[in-house]
Amino acid sequence: MTDAEISFLPFHAINEFMTDEYRLEVVRSVLYSLPDLPGPYSASINRIVRQLVKIPGFRMSDKAPTAVKTRPVARAFEKDPELVAAILAAWAEFHADLRQRVYDCLTGIGWELLPVDADRTQFPGFLPSWPAGQDFDSIYQVYQEKYPGTEESSNNVSLMTVWLGGRLPYSSTGVDEDNP
């Protein structure tokens, strides 16, 4: 496959792999953590929210209380790739320890990844391919074996895998060593 043939799925395609409850949890956690994140994360999210989200009673929706804007932002997350990228970048930054642990697990099982701190928001979306023979459950199992003392949800490990890998599991690539 040449570079001209590489296709990407827009960032908001991730919603097909997220439950409504988990999406709301991710958005809520990011909105509440914005004051604790470096400025570029909050500036980017606030700019996008101001453009996309309308909240009755607020001329500038980014100024609404977090509890009021969480659901409207989660609805916008379902449709806007730029918002998804900004939210996921902030979420990954806020979960830096998890990010490093998942990165170490993925590189340990042969994933080729950009550096852990690379700006993944600059990509047009996710690659629609996944390494053969791997799925969210097998990656979570690797994570649990490598870090038995941590209590991280499979949803968080899976989301970090998608973000760091820049891939959604629509199809498999490569050779499955169990089934050549």
Image (spheres, grey):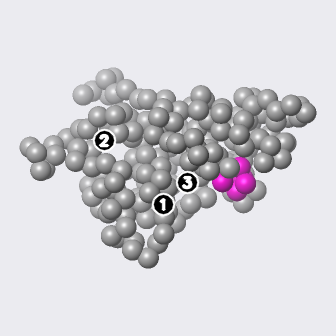
- CB atoms of marks 1 and 3 within 8 Å: no
Q: How far is mark 1 from mark 3, CA to CA?
A: 14 Å
Residue drawn at the location 38% of the way across and 35% of the way down: 127
> What crowding class fits label 3: few (fewer than 14 Cα within 10 Å), some (14-19), or many (20 or more)?
many
Question: Residue visible at 72% across and 35% down?
Answer: 72
**Percent position of residue 164, x then y:** 44, 50
What is the quadrant of the N terminus in the image?
top left
- Please name the amino acid that badge 2 sits on: Trp
Does residue 153 sit above or below 58 in this rendering?
Answer: below
Looking at the image, can residue 55 be seen? yes
Query: Of marks 3 and 2, which one's residue comes earlier in the chain?
Result: 3
Nearer-N-terminus badge (1/3)? 3
- The residue segment tinted magenta is 29-34
Please say whether residue 11 is visible from this viewpoint: no
Disc 2 packing (10 Å; few <14; some 14–19; many ≥20): many
Disc 2 and disc 1: Cα gap in Å?
21 Å
User: For the view shown, which residue lies furthest in the bottom direction?
Assistant: 149
Instruction: Read off the residue under disc 1.
Output: 153
Q: Secondary structure at mark 2?
A: strand
Q: The disc labelled 3 sits on which kind of residue? A: Ala
Q: Depth check: 120 or 33 in front?
A: 33
Which residue sits at x=48%, y=64%? 152
Q: Does the segment drawn in magenta span residue 16?
A: no
Identify the element where label 3 is drawn. Answer: helix
Q: Which residue is mark 3?
A: 92
Q: Which mark is residue 130?
A: 2
The secondary structure that dominates the magenta segment is helix
For residue 102, what is the image quadrant? Answer: bottom left
Mark closest to the chain's N terminus, 2 or 1: 2
